[in-house]
Image (tube, rainbow, N blue to C red):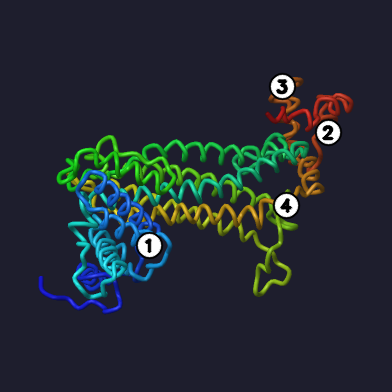
Amino acid sequence: MGEVQVPADKYWAAQTERSRNNFKIGPEASMPKEIIEAFGYLKKAAAYANHDLGVLPVEKRDLIAQACDEILANKLDDQFPLVIWQTGSGTQSNMNLNEVISNRAHVLNGGKLGEKSIIHPNDDVNKSQSSNDTYPTAMHIAAYKKVVEVTIPCVERLQKTLAQKADAFKDVVKIGRTHLMDATPLTLGQEFSAYAAQLDFGLRALKNTLPHLAQLALGGTAVGTGLNTPKGYDVKVADYIAKFTGLPFITAENKFEALATHDAVVETHGALKQLAVSLYKIANDIRLLASGPRSGIGEILIPENEPGSSIMPGKVNPTQCEAMTMVCAQVLGNDTTISFAGTQGHFQLNVFKPVMAANFLQSAQLLADACVSFDEHCAVGIEPNFPRIKKQLDDSLMLVTALNTHIGYENAAKIAKTAHKNGTTLKEEAINLGLVTAEQFDEWVRPEDMVGSLK
């Protein structure tokens, strides 16, 4: 293809430079840093596995490993300029890593940048590999690490706070709402227990996807057959990746599936989507419960973090709820992209890998950040607005439900409709209609007896 000019102070080479020139799409260097780090782990592991199996000299192994360690230490971050909008297999990013590791290893060995490296990017750094199995391996490493080390702990933090609020509010009886209309009572603690349970189930779903995500494609090479790999390489290289990352990675049960599809990524992101759905409902409920301060529901008080309006003095808005719901919308959009990208496994290779990786990692990080922000600046400071809760409970017509078993549904409905029409209380109309006595009403209509028990 002819010569190509490469910046003299950069470790990359011709293939990276061609990609820079051919794919000027979006911001430069948009390939996620987590993917670059994952490549650092897998290239180091490949060097060790190849050496153990007798196909790479120890001197080359150590130089490759040293360069990879610098990548993992963030010392070469400016050497990875490529965008996600490139070949769908991620070939150019794989070669970007190969070239940088090759040239950096040469310099570490005493050579000069620009000289022909003693470590060949294809024959040594990429030995026993193909872009078709390295990029999906990097996807799984990056996704697994992000979910386990970042997303799960942050969601667990918010879940714990909501569970604590459920316990703290267990005796606060309030009116329930279905269809956005008044319903029978429950406690504020019961309401918050649902939020805590949602996140608990979401976390379980997310954790249940991890065994599939832990399976690595490396060793499948071009189409899944393992062409040009020494016997036992796939198991050994996965073992090294597990050792270097401290995470339970294993070789994929079926390399053909691991290259042609990315169902594991679709599956795990589906669990992230489930969390986003739950978090949207939670944030939206809290926003509505805190609405007011005088004309809304106003049953809870949330922290006042900043002025809410540039024109209305004293206005405070539920900004953490709004930020959370926007994050959830982004994750739902990312899931649509990932789901469609997952369908694009034509025969032996899926060629939507970079966009899947980028969207997955964004979702996992956004959910983590949003949970921490929402917890710190909203959830921990939520308190009941007792006067408002009592007023709305006392005014509710749905307390009449407690009379069903004593006077029947139709008579109870008559009391509620009459009270609503006349603007009177349930007790007044129940007595006026001659359906119950004052003593019976007080005995039978007791909101605190209508909430069951919080398990």
> CB atoms at circles 3 and 2 under 8 Å apart?
no
Q: Residues under labels 3 and 2: Cα distance?
A: 16 Å
Residue 60: horizontal and vertical position, in percent? 25, 57
Q: Residues under labels 4 and 3: Cα distance?
A: 33 Å
Position of residue 104 in the picture relative to residue 203 (left or right): left
Q: Residue 298 carries which label?
A: 4
Give the secondary structure at mark 2.
helix
Q: Residues under labels 1 and 4: Cα distance?
A: 52 Å
Residue type at mark 3 is Gly
Q: Is residue 367 above or below residue 77?
A: above
From where the camera sits, is residue 237 visible? yes
Position of residue 124 in the picture relative to residue 397 (left or right): left
Circle 4 Cα neighbour tier, 10 Å, few/some/many (<14 / 14–19 / ≥20): many
> CB atoms at circles 4 and 3 under 8 Å apart?
no
Q: Name the residue under label 2.
A: 427
Q: Residue at x 74, y 29 (%)?
A: 450
Which is more N-terminal, label 1 or label 2?
Answer: 1
Which is more N-terminal, label 2 or label 4?
Answer: 4
Q: Which mark is residue 408?
A: 3
Give the secondary structure at mark 4.
loop
Q: Residue at x 24, y 48 (%)?
A: 50
Q: Would you identify the image quadrant in which residue 69 lies? A: bottom left
Residue 32: horizontal and vertical position, in percent? 38, 61
Q: Name the residue under label 1.
A: 71
